[in-house]
Image (tube, rainbow, N blue to C red):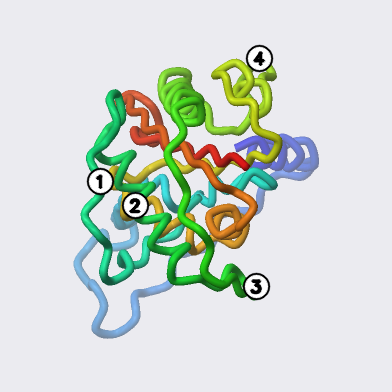
Amino acid sequence: MHRFLLLSLLLGGVACRPAPPPRPASPPPPGWNNAPGWNNAPPPAPAPAPPPPAFNPLAWIPLLLQPFPMPAPGAPAPAGVPAPAPAPAGVLPSEQEVLALVNVHRQQGAVCGGRAFGPAPPLAFDPYLHRAARSHSQDMANRQFFDHTTPEGRTVADRLRAAGFRGNAYGENIAAGNETASATVAQWMRSTGHCENIMDPQFRLLGVGYGANPASPYTHYWTQNFGG
């Protein structure tokens, strides 16, 4: 629009001579519309613009933030996934399912990007890591941000300490957009940095947190907090 207006003004300033008389209209080609007045017919209406593509939040994901290692369409869950153990008090079944799926991958081994990981010991549930993960997921959903650092600058380490975790090694994966545990774990496994966190043998503990807000851009938010 600005370019068109500027061009119109420039052309208006250059016109210093009278405009030449209009040229007579040429006859229509044979077989065209030969009805009287054809030359004065209004131009055909432009074709309607195609509708915009449906919004797909996964189109701009990865929301994969390094080094605390989201998304591509998920691969199917690995075969032989055992039924998740009963969730501890206050833990959602979907959060417990993430832990079970992670331990299946650790038992089988995986290739993360070009790096092969052999089988690793299973991760154990940790209530402090779970508290930090749940809090962060719900915070992202409520305040509609997606980051390892909160809007006021609290880092992963800050949040883990506030939740009571005192381990030395830690890591974090976050994801958004998928409702199910299986699709979310599959997305993480397809991302090199997140897969490496899941398979890292130095980690022994895991807390998983899920948060949701239908008014937020991605609705579903997930956090994995790893501890060593």
Regarding residue 42, the answer to whether it shows in the image is: no
Residue 83, compared with residue 212, is above or below; it is below
Indicate whether 39 appears above or below 147.
Answer: below
Q: Circle 1: is it few (<14), some (14-19), or many (20+) Cα within 10 Å?
A: few
- Image coordinates for residue 171, horizontal then vertical, percent: 62, 42
- Secondary structure, mark 1, is loop
Q: Residues within 10 Å of mark 3 (few under 14, many from 20)?
A: few
Task: Give the class, few, some or many, for how many residues have Cα within 10 Å of label 2's Cα (few <14, many ≥20).
Answer: many
Give the labeled residue for mark 1: 85
Q: Would you say the residues marked 2 and 1 are in contact, meaning their CB atoms lie under 8 Å apart? A: yes
Nearer the N terminus, badge 2 or badge 1? 1
Q: Residue at x 61, y 74 (%)?
A: 116
User: What element does badge 2 sit on?
Assistant: helix
Mark 1, mark 3: which one is toward the viewer? 1
Q: Quadrant of the N terminus?
A: top right
Q: CA distance from mark 2 to mark 4?
A: 33 Å
Asked which quadrant contains residue 9, the reply is top right
Write down the residue under mark 3: 115
Whether residue 181 is visible = yes
Picture quarter with the C terminus: top right
- Identify residue for label 4: 152
Q: CA distance from mark 3 to mark 2?
A: 23 Å
Closer-to-camera residue (136/59): 136
- Residue 120 image offset from top left, x and y in percent: 53, 63
Q: CA distance from mark 3 to mark 4?
A: 35 Å
Q: Earlier in the sequence, mark 3 or mark 2?
A: 2
- Camera-side mark, 4 or 1: 1
> Marks 2 and 4: which is nearer the front?
2
First along the sequence among labels 2 and 4: 2
Which amino acid does the dot numbered 4 rest on?
Answer: Glu
Nearer the camera: disc 3 or disc 4 = 3
Q: Position of residue 174 (x, y in %)?
A: 51, 41
